[in-house]
Image (cartoon, coloured by chain):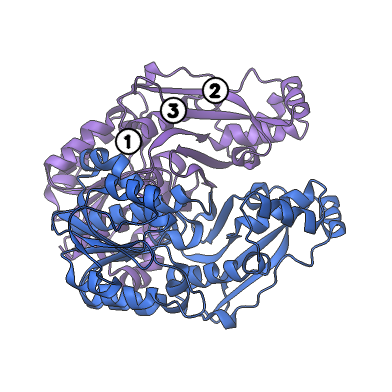
Chain colours: A blue, B purple
Amino acid sequence: MTELKIALIGFGVVGQGLVEILLEQKKELKVKYGLEFSVVAVSDTIKGSIYDETGLDIQKLLDLVKETGNINDYPNGVKGWDSLKTIKETNSNLIVEVSWTDIKTGEPAISHVKAALKSQKHVVMTNKGPIALVARDLLSLAEANNVQIRFEGTVLSGTPAINLGLNNLAGSKISKIAGIVNGTTNYILTEMEKGLGYDEALKQAQDLGYAEADPTADVEGYDALGKIVILANVVMGGNLTKDQVPRQGITKITVKDIEDAKKEGKRWKLIAGAEFKKDNSIEAYVRPEKIPLDHPLAAVTGPINALTYTTKYLGDVTIVGPGAGREATGFGLLNDILDIYRYIKK
Amino acid sequence: MTELKIALIGFGVVGQGLVEILLEQKKELKVKYGLEFSVVAVSDTIKGSIYDETGLDIQKLLDLVKETGNINDYPNGVKGWDSLKTIKETNSNLIVEVSWTDIKTGEPAISHVKAALKSQKHVVMTNKGPIALVARDLLSLAEANNVQIRFEGTVLSGTPAINLGLNNLAGSKISKIAGIVNGTTNYILTEMEKGLGYDEALKQAQDLGYAEADPTADVEGYDALGKIVILANVVMGGNLTKDQVPRQGITKITVKDIEDAKKEGKRWKLIAGAEFKKDNSIEAYVRPEKIPLDHPLAAVTGPINALTYTTKYLGDVTIVGPGAGREATGFGLLNDILDIYRYIKK
């Protein structure tokens, strides 16, 4: 296979973010990495569906969404194919799964990904739901069908968290992974350290768009929980389910707790961690921890994320970068596509 | 090719470090990554040379070096082959180049690597000399001979600095790389911040084995210079030579400078950097800089190293980890071997 023929399932913020980067980089991707691609299909339950086996005009799609909110006025191609028909019946060989996230069931994304793998098409995705729930099944299914699946963007958006552990630290004997994997709570804790109360800091995070109107998923640690389950299962080879992982959020941290930590030369962080126990089982958790100021994680402030891998041969290796954002997440998909391309092009 | 047949050119601290890890991990490497290997030859100008096409007993080699300082009493195999004969005429298919470093000429390592690539053998190495001088030539030679060359350990020992830029950030549009790439100077600056004068801090670094008796290469920035040239040329696609890069060490930093920075909420670090200018040329430098305390590099203290990649799509991504050490550098070689294996096994 020399050319990637991409179908996007979903065309929201992340899908559009990817497509913008693809458009901007088309020439450079070919010169630098040899990557040739076309986007042959887009299928979105709200914005509409278009399929053209010879390739769609990406700029036109982006313009249409900006102007009309949908892609129904696209001049050529076949219209109206739903997600599964688009996955199975287009001439695509790589599916970008960027439909919505249902963290409880993982649907419809799980069905999309399974259909794609069974159709022997590669998959890239940033949707935490399916990976937190059934990562191992999907990896096995990909292997059985001799195709690749990548999902770097599910943990720290495009910041290389999963690939760092899987590839760059391969052979280092990872004993523990722990870090700051939720930007909203890290922003709130950073603001509380500057003197705000919890409610004020949350309000500020909401005003800036870091926190949602219902902040439960972030502040109670559910988002972090999904991410540490992914890391434990995918990087450490575990088989955890979310209900096996104790979870504590930041809602009970008071201004006094923050002050007390400061006096000890420490700083509160919401830590998601997973480590091997003596019996080789994996124990994972999400909880606020007081981190010494000279630890790299203590220096990670505001909405930035970070992960520390504890290894036998390197000791601690920490990666720090963004954990969210349209471009950062879009880049995660691009990097996954490049990684698959590097893998299959030989 | 299913089995890697490894020949080590050099059997000093780093070579022994690698071999210890290989021995310890043999089973796990097979189960986890499918890697099967044997060490068929070791050639060291001081410790002796052994070749056995059916594979050497690694434990025996390590024991012999520990007991006798050389490997001359190894019971089987052919003895006395020099480096080039070992590279060319053994049945090895992967050469681990860990001979000594001559930072000015890059020899004899450059000759070793060229001979290996021309013999269509893969190469892994941690020797900065050849890579700082002729990285592009060696990469071209590898490509022309359809073999792989890896040298992650040349910059931050086993901490993934090069592969992070080349693979995990591929497509992110890197505009700048800057970081702390010399542990000795970072240790000295950290101790000076605790109140020591430069001479005392240097003495302490020497007592701990971080600094050599002649500390020039570290404190005057030559070591950092070689590393930033590697990053600029290999990751950013530059073509710099060392004499094009302005270099300033830490010897002129006074206790007063340290205090003044503290008052500004900053901290002195020896920074090696490279960035694209408007005309798309690359400007590199090694110089002390005052880093704001809320920047991830400011939190990197003692002998630890770190690099920040500034990218278009992710903003800043920083990696923090060890920059030296027997195990860390040995791991760099192992990870390079695994990366080559992943690449060629398909």
Look at 15% across and 64% down and name the residue there.
A91
Chain of the residue under the numbered disc 1 shown in the image: B
Mark nearer the N terminus (1 vs 2): 1
User: Does residue B73 appear in the picture of this structure?
Assistant: no
Mark nearer the N terminus (3 vs 1): 1
Q: Is residue B244 left or right of residue B42?
A: right
Up/down of A335 relative to A166, above or below: above
Instruction: Where is residue A170? Give x, y as percent.
Output: 39, 61
Q: Look at label 2 and name its amino acid.
A: Arg
Mark nearer the N terminus (2 vs 3): 3
Q: Which quadrant does the C terminus of chain A fall into? A: bottom left
Nearest the camera: B225 or B19?
Answer: B225
Res. B274 mark = 3
Q: CA distance from mark 2 to mark 3?
A: 12 Å
Q: CA distance from mark 3 to mark 1?
A: 12 Å
Look at 52% across and 54% down and name the residue there.
A324
Look at 32% across and 63% down and name the residue there.
A48
Mark 2 vs 3: CB contact within 8 A = no
Mark 1 vs 2: CB contact within 8 A = no
Q: Is residue A183 left or right of residue B341?
A: right
Q: Secondary structure at mark 3?
A: strand
Q: Secondary structure at mark 1?
A: helix
Quarter of the image where one finds residue A291: bottom right
Q: Secondary structure at mark 2?
A: strand
